[in-house]
Image (cartoon, grey):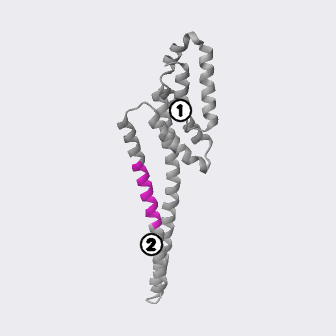
Amino acid sequence: MNRIEFMNSLQYKLRRLPYEEVQNAISYYEEYFDEAGTENEAQTIVSLGSPSDVASKIIGEYAITVAEFKPVEKKKTNVILVTVLAIFASPIALPIAISILLILFSVGLVIFSLFITGVASIIAGIATLFMGFWAFSDGFGTGLFYIGSSVLIIAIGASITLGTLKLGKTTLLGLQRWMGKLLIRRSK
């Protein structure tokens, strides 16, 4: 592999990143090759590793940077996509990648289940509130008990729902940073 093949392969592997990031990376490695000189081209390629290794490192660093410094709502989907791409761009074994994806899927299911539990609690609390108004026909204490219980159930459900949303966001960002650091460490 020569310099041109290396750079073309690297640019292709970075195609999912924003244009500016790709250009910065390509410029950096072009300068790196220029400083090494044409006589050291083969040694430079060996020292850098494969274009997949270099692309994996760049994508992982980009994912970490975006997760830490750009928490804009529109960027979250891109960051997740870039993180997943970083996993598949790195030279790790397919079973490890599948295991990581299954762990992420399991964590997502647990968080989603907690969210559904919170929403179901809110709906049950609202239903109990209406039953409380009907229970006033049985007695003032009975109606008051149902209304108080329904308010408690709604509050618990709202707490679970809001806590799950916060937990989901925190977990997603934490897993993303962890995977990015793992990819960077593996590529060194």
Could you say where residue 58 lies in the image, as x and y percent from the top left?
55, 31
Vertical side of 169 occupied by 119: above or below: below
The image shows a total of numbered marks equal to 2
Residue at x 57% of width, y 36% of height: 62
x and y, in percent, of residue 68 in the image: 59, 40
Residues in magenta, as a range: 105-119
**SS class of the residue under badge 2?**
helix
Amino acid at the residue labelled 1: Tyr
Residue 107 part of the magenta segment: yes
| Magenta run includes residue 34 | no
The reply to whether the C-beta atoms of the residues labelled 2 and 1 are less than 8 Å apart is no
Q: Earlier in the sequence, mark 2 or mark 1?
A: 1
Foreground mark, 2 or 1? 1
Q: Which of these two is toward me, 86 or 128? A: 86
Q: Residues within 10 Å of mark 2 (few under 14, many from 20)?
A: some
Secondary element at image label 1:
helix
Relative depth, front residue between 38 and 71: 38
Q: Residue at x 53, y 50 (%)?
A: 169
Read off the residue under disc 1: 12
At 45% from the left edge and 88% from the top edge, which residue is drawn? 139
User: Which residue in the protein does label 2 denote?
Assistant: 124
Q: Residue at x 64, y 35 (%)?
A: 20
Evaluate whether residue 178 shows in this view.
no
Compared to residue 5, the image places residue 152 above or below, namely: below
Q: Position of residue 75 (x, y in %)?
A: 59, 46
Where residue 16 sits, quadrant-wise, is top right
Q: Residue furthest left?
A: 95
- Count residues near mark 1 (Cα–Cα under 10 Å), then give few for <14, some for 14-19, many for 20+: some
Across and down, in percent, residue 188 comes to 48, 25
Q: Is residue 38 above or below residue 64?
A: above
Residue nearest the observer in this picture, 164 or 104: 104
> At label 2, which amino acid type do we have?
Ala
